[in-house]
Protein backbone atom coordinates (compact mmCIF):
# COMPACT_ATOMS: atom_id res chain seq x y z
CA UNK A 1 0.00 0.00 0.00
CA UNK A 2 1.21 3.49 -0.83
CA UNK A 3 1.70 5.65 2.26
CA UNK A 4 2.74 9.21 2.93
CA UNK A 5 5.60 10.40 5.09
CA UNK A 6 5.94 14.08 5.96
CA UNK A 7 8.52 15.88 8.08
CA UNK A 8 9.18 19.29 9.59
CA UNK A 9 12.49 20.73 10.82
CA UNK A 10 13.19 22.54 14.09
CA UNK A 11 16.40 24.41 14.90
CA UNK A 12 17.52 24.33 18.56
CA UNK A 13 20.38 26.36 20.00
CA UNK A 14 22.14 26.66 23.33
CA UNK A 15 25.26 28.43 24.63
CA UNK A 16 27.83 27.13 25.21
CA UNK A 17 27.16 24.32 22.78
CA UNK A 18 28.63 21.24 21.11
CA UNK A 19 27.15 18.25 19.27
CA UNK A 20 27.66 16.16 22.39
CA UNK A 21 25.73 18.70 24.50
CA UNK A 22 22.70 18.46 22.22
CA UNK A 23 22.67 14.67 22.55
CA UNK A 24 22.99 15.04 26.32
CA UNK A 25 20.11 17.55 26.33
CA UNK A 26 17.71 15.20 24.53
CA UNK A 27 18.67 12.26 26.73
CA UNK A 28 18.14 14.41 29.81
CA UNK A 29 14.75 15.49 28.47
CA UNK A 30 13.78 11.83 28.13
CA UNK A 31 14.82 11.11 31.72
CA UNK A 32 12.51 13.88 32.92
CA UNK A 33 9.54 11.72 31.97
CA UNK A 34 7.27 14.79 31.94
CA UNK A 35 4.02 15.21 29.99
CA UNK A 36 3.90 18.45 28.02
CA UNK A 37 0.68 20.43 27.59
CA UNK A 38 0.23 21.45 23.97
CA UNK A 39 -3.19 23.11 23.90
CA UNK A 40 -6.71 22.34 25.11
CA UNK A 41 -6.84 18.66 26.04
CA UNK A 42 -3.83 17.73 23.87
CA UNK A 43 -0.69 16.57 25.64
CA UNK A 44 2.49 14.83 24.49
CA UNK A 45 5.45 12.92 25.91
CA UNK A 46 8.95 12.10 24.70
CA UNK A 47 9.64 8.38 24.94
CA UNK A 48 12.35 5.99 23.73
CA UNK A 49 15.62 7.61 22.63
CA UNK A 50 18.22 5.63 20.67
CA UNK A 51 21.37 6.28 18.70
CA UNK A 52 21.25 5.80 14.94
CA UNK A 53 24.02 3.36 14.02
CA UNK A 54 23.96 3.80 10.24
CA UNK A 55 25.37 7.30 9.85
CA UNK A 56 28.59 8.83 8.57
CA UNK A 57 28.32 11.79 10.97
CA UNK A 58 31.06 11.93 13.60
CA UNK A 59 28.45 12.39 16.32
CA UNK A 60 25.69 10.04 15.26
CA UNK A 61 22.07 11.21 15.21
CA UNK A 62 19.66 10.03 17.87
CA UNK A 63 15.99 9.26 17.36
CA UNK A 64 12.93 8.61 19.46
CA UNK A 65 9.18 8.90 19.68
CA UNK A 66 6.67 11.55 20.67
CA UNK A 67 3.29 10.27 21.81
CA UNK A 68 0.45 12.75 21.49
CA UNK A 69 -2.80 12.00 23.32
CA UNK A 70 -5.89 13.44 24.94
CA UNK A 71 -5.65 14.19 28.65
CA UNK A 72 -8.58 15.03 30.91
CA UNK A 73 -9.51 15.66 34.52
CA UNK A 74 -10.24 12.22 35.92
CA UNK A 75 -12.27 13.80 38.72
CA UNK A 76 -14.61 15.65 36.35
CA UNK A 77 -18.14 14.48 35.63
CA UNK A 78 -18.59 11.51 33.29
CA UNK A 79 -21.54 11.15 30.92
CA UNK A 80 -23.43 7.85 30.80
CA UNK A 81 -24.71 7.42 27.25
CA UNK A 82 -27.21 4.76 28.34
CA UNK A 83 -28.92 6.74 31.11
CA UNK A 84 -28.33 10.10 29.40
CA UNK A 85 -27.20 11.51 32.75
CA UNK A 86 -24.02 12.05 34.76
CA UNK A 87 -22.47 8.77 35.85
CA UNK A 88 -22.98 7.79 39.45
CA UNK A 89 -20.06 7.49 41.88
CA UNK A 90 -20.36 3.71 41.64
CA UNK A 91 -20.22 3.81 37.85
CA UNK A 92 -17.20 6.10 37.94
CA UNK A 93 -15.31 3.61 40.07
CA UNK A 94 -14.89 1.51 36.91
CA UNK A 95 -12.77 4.27 35.37
CA UNK A 96 -10.11 3.74 38.05
CA UNK A 97 -9.11 0.57 36.22
CA UNK A 98 -7.96 2.59 33.20
CA UNK A 99 -6.62 5.62 35.04
CA UNK A 100 -3.19 5.17 33.44
CA UNK A 101 -4.59 5.09 29.88
CA UNK A 102 -5.24 8.03 27.57
CA UNK A 103 -7.35 8.05 24.39
CA UNK A 104 -6.61 9.20 20.82
CA UNK A 105 -2.92 8.32 21.08
CA UNK A 106 -0.69 8.69 18.03
CA UNK A 107 3.07 8.16 17.76
CA UNK A 108 5.35 10.57 15.90
CA UNK A 109 9.05 9.92 15.34
CA UNK A 110 11.84 12.50 15.62
CA UNK A 111 15.55 12.52 14.84
CA UNK A 112 18.20 14.90 16.19
CA UNK A 113 21.20 15.68 13.99
CA UNK A 114 23.56 17.03 16.68
CA UNK A 115 26.24 18.50 14.41
CA UNK A 116 23.62 20.75 12.82
CA UNK A 117 21.46 21.08 15.98
CA UNK A 118 18.39 20.23 13.88
CA UNK A 119 15.42 18.11 14.90
CA UNK A 120 13.48 16.46 12.10
CA UNK A 121 10.06 15.20 13.22
CA UNK A 122 7.31 13.25 11.52
CA UNK A 123 4.39 15.59 10.92
CA UNK A 124 1.97 13.01 9.50
CA UNK A 125 1.11 9.54 10.80
CA UNK A 126 -1.95 7.45 9.94
CA UNK A 127 -3.88 10.46 8.62
CA UNK A 128 -3.18 12.43 11.79
CA UNK A 129 -0.91 15.44 12.10
CA UNK A 130 1.59 16.96 14.47
CA UNK A 131 1.43 20.53 13.21
CA UNK A 132 4.54 22.74 13.11
CA UNK A 133 2.96 24.95 15.77
CA UNK A 134 2.38 22.04 18.17
CA UNK A 135 5.80 20.51 17.46
CA UNK A 136 7.45 23.85 18.27
CA UNK A 137 5.39 24.24 21.46
CA UNK A 138 6.33 20.70 22.50
CA UNK A 139 10.09 21.07 22.11
CA UNK A 140 10.13 24.62 23.47
CA UNK A 141 8.31 23.63 26.67
CA UNK A 142 10.18 20.36 27.08
CA UNK A 143 13.72 21.64 26.48
CA UNK A 144 13.13 24.72 28.63
CA UNK A 145 11.68 22.76 31.54
CA UNK A 146 12.97 24.30 34.81
CA UNK A 147 14.99 21.17 35.61
CA UNK A 148 16.81 21.37 32.29
CA UNK A 149 17.09 25.17 32.37
CA UNK A 150 19.22 24.94 35.52
CA UNK A 151 21.74 22.77 33.68
CA UNK A 152 21.67 23.96 30.06
CA UNK A 153 20.28 27.50 30.28
CA UNK A 154 17.75 28.81 27.73
CA UNK A 155 17.17 26.69 24.64
CA UNK A 156 16.02 28.65 21.60
CA UNK A 157 13.56 26.70 19.47
CA UNK A 158 12.75 27.88 15.94
CA UNK A 159 10.78 26.01 13.30
CA UNK A 160 12.64 26.33 10.01
CA UNK A 161 10.62 28.25 7.39
CA UNK A 162 10.23 27.36 3.72
CA UNK A 163 13.43 27.74 1.76
CA UNK A 164 12.06 30.56 -0.43
CA UNK A 165 10.73 32.86 2.28
CA UNK A 166 13.86 35.01 2.66
CA UNK A 167 13.90 35.73 -1.07
CA UNK A 168 10.15 36.39 -0.95
CA UNK A 169 10.73 39.00 1.74
CA UNK A 170 13.58 40.65 -0.13
CA UNK A 171 11.77 40.66 -3.50
CA UNK A 172 8.53 42.18 -2.21
CA UNK A 173 8.25 45.30 -4.44
CA UNK A 174 7.11 47.71 -1.74
CA UNK A 175 8.44 46.90 1.72
CA UNK A 176 6.83 49.28 4.20
CA UNK A 177 7.74 47.61 7.51
CA UNK A 178 10.26 44.96 8.47
CA UNK A 179 10.46 43.26 11.87
CA UNK A 180 13.34 40.98 12.88
CA UNK A 181 13.77 38.96 16.07
CA UNK A 182 17.10 37.20 16.45
CA UNK A 183 18.21 34.94 19.29
CA UNK A 184 21.81 33.88 19.81
CA UNK A 185 22.94 31.91 16.72
CA UNK A 186 25.17 28.85 16.88
CA UNK A 187 27.63 30.46 14.49
CA UNK A 188 27.90 27.64 11.98
CA UNK A 189 28.54 30.22 9.25
CA UNK A 190 30.81 33.27 9.13
CA UNK A 191 27.90 35.74 9.12
CA UNK A 192 26.39 34.01 12.16
CA UNK A 193 29.75 34.13 13.95
CA UNK A 194 30.01 37.88 13.41
CA UNK A 195 26.47 38.44 14.64
CA UNK A 196 27.09 36.29 17.73
CA UNK A 197 30.25 38.27 18.51
CA UNK A 198 28.16 41.44 18.36
CA UNK A 199 25.58 39.95 20.73
CA UNK A 200 28.30 38.75 23.09
CA UNK A 201 29.84 42.22 23.17
CA UNK A 202 26.43 43.62 24.10
CA UNK A 203 25.54 40.78 26.51
CA UNK A 204 22.38 40.38 24.43
CA UNK A 205 20.19 37.28 24.61
CA UNK A 206 17.84 38.54 21.91
CA UNK A 207 17.86 41.41 19.42
CA UNK A 208 14.75 42.98 17.89
CA UNK A 209 15.05 45.24 14.86
CA UNK A 210 12.20 47.28 13.39
CA UNK A 211 12.39 49.21 10.15
CA UNK A 212 9.79 51.58 8.67
CA UNK A 213 10.19 53.03 5.19
CA UNK A 214 10.05 56.74 4.42
CA UNK A 215 6.49 57.59 3.23
CA UNK A 216 5.81 56.61 -0.40
CA UNK A 217 9.05 54.62 -0.64
CA UNK A 218 10.20 51.04 -0.07
CA UNK A 219 12.87 49.75 2.28
CA UNK A 220 16.18 49.00 0.56
CA UNK A 221 17.73 45.67 1.58
CA UNK A 222 21.52 45.92 1.45
CA UNK A 223 23.86 42.97 2.00
CA UNK A 224 24.03 43.54 5.77
CA UNK A 225 20.26 43.63 6.17
CA UNK A 226 19.89 40.58 3.93
CA UNK A 227 22.24 38.65 6.23
CA UNK A 228 20.21 39.71 9.25
CA UNK A 229 16.99 38.50 7.59
CA UNK A 230 18.63 35.13 6.87
CA UNK A 231 19.79 34.80 10.49
CA UNK A 232 16.36 35.84 11.82
CA UNK A 233 14.64 33.21 9.68
CA UNK A 234 16.83 30.52 11.25
CA UNK A 235 17.14 31.81 14.81
CA UNK A 236 13.95 33.77 15.47
CA UNK A 237 11.60 35.20 12.90
CA UNK A 238 11.29 37.82 10.19
CA UNK A 239 8.14 39.65 9.12
CA UNK A 240 7.62 42.15 6.32
CA UNK A 241 4.52 44.16 5.44
CA UNK A 242 4.01 45.99 2.17
CA UNK A 243 2.44 45.72 -1.27
CA UNK A 244 3.06 43.36 -4.19
CA UNK A 245 3.40 44.11 -7.91
CA UNK A 246 -0.40 44.38 -8.16
CA UNK A 247 -0.48 46.88 -5.29
CA UNK A 248 -2.19 44.35 -3.03
CA UNK A 249 -1.46 44.46 0.69
CA UNK A 250 0.94 41.63 1.64
CA UNK A 251 2.44 40.34 4.88
CA UNK A 252 5.13 37.66 4.85
CA UNK A 253 6.03 36.09 8.21
CA UNK A 254 8.51 33.22 8.55
CA UNK A 255 6.39 31.83 11.40
CA UNK A 256 3.46 31.40 9.01
CA UNK A 257 5.33 29.40 6.35
CA UNK A 258 6.99 26.45 8.14
CA UNK A 259 9.19 24.11 6.16
CA UNK A 260 7.54 20.76 5.42
CA UNK A 261 8.66 18.00 3.06
CA UNK A 262 6.83 14.82 2.08
CA UNK A 263 7.32 11.62 0.13
CA UNK A 264 5.36 8.50 -0.82
CA UNK A 265 6.57 4.98 -0.03
CA UNK A 266 5.29 1.42 -0.45
CA UNK A 267 4.86 -0.32 2.90
CA UNK A 268 5.32 -3.71 1.20
CA UNK A 269 9.05 -3.17 0.90
CA UNK A 270 9.75 -0.14 3.13
CA UNK A 271 9.04 0.34 6.82
CA UNK A 272 7.65 3.64 8.07
CA UNK A 273 10.88 4.18 10.04
CA UNK A 274 13.07 3.62 6.98
CA UNK A 275 10.90 6.02 4.96
CA UNK A 276 11.14 8.62 7.71
CA UNK A 277 14.89 8.25 8.09
CA UNK A 278 15.47 8.48 4.34
CA UNK A 279 13.42 11.67 4.05
CA UNK A 280 14.98 13.14 7.21
CA UNK A 281 18.51 12.62 5.88
CA UNK A 282 17.56 14.12 2.51
CA UNK A 283 16.03 17.19 4.17
CA UNK A 284 18.99 17.73 6.50
CA UNK A 285 21.40 17.66 3.56
CA UNK A 286 19.49 20.66 2.23
CA UNK A 287 20.32 22.63 5.41
CA UNK A 288 24.01 21.67 5.62
Image (cartoon, rainbow, N blue to C red):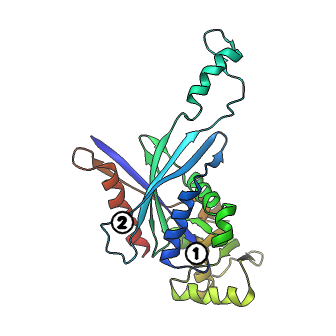
Q: Going 30% across and 67% down the picture, which residue do you hit?
A: 54
Q: Between 233 and 50, which is closer to the camera in this rendering?
A: 50
- Residue 229's place in the image compared with 273, above or below, is below
Relative placement, left or right, of 217 versus 3 is right
Rounded to the nearest whole Å, what is the CA distance between mark 2 and mark 1? 29 Å
Tell me, yes or no, if residue 103 can be seen here.
Answer: yes
User: Mark 2 or mark 1, which is nearer to you?
Assistant: 2
Secondary-structure class at tag 2: helix
Q: Indicate which disc residue 170 carries.
A: 1
- Residue 248's spot in the image, x, y percent? 64, 60
Q: Indicate which disc residue 281 carries.
A: 2
- Residue 167's spot in the image, x, y percent? 53, 73
Label 1 neighbourhood size at 10 Å, few (<14), some (14-19), many (20+)?
A: some
- Residue 34's place in the image compared with 145, above or below, is above
Q: Going 60% across and 81% down the picture, which residue do you hit?
A: 16
Q: Going 61% across and 14% down the picture, which residue do you hit?
A: 81
In terms of image quadrants, where is residue 210? bottom right
Kindly check if marks 2 and 1 are in contact, taking CB atoms under 8 A apart as contact.
no
Tell me, yes or no, if residue 87 can be seen here.
Answer: no
- Residue 105's place in the image compared with 278, above or below, is above
Amino acid sequence: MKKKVEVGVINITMHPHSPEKYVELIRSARKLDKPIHLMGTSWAELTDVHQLQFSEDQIKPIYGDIYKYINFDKDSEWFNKETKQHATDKEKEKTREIEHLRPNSIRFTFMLFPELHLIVYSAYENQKRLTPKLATIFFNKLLNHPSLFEVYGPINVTHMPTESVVEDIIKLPKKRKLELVITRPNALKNTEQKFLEKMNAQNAQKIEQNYTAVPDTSLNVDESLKENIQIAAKYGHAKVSGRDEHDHSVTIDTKQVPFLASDIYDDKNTTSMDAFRRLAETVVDFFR
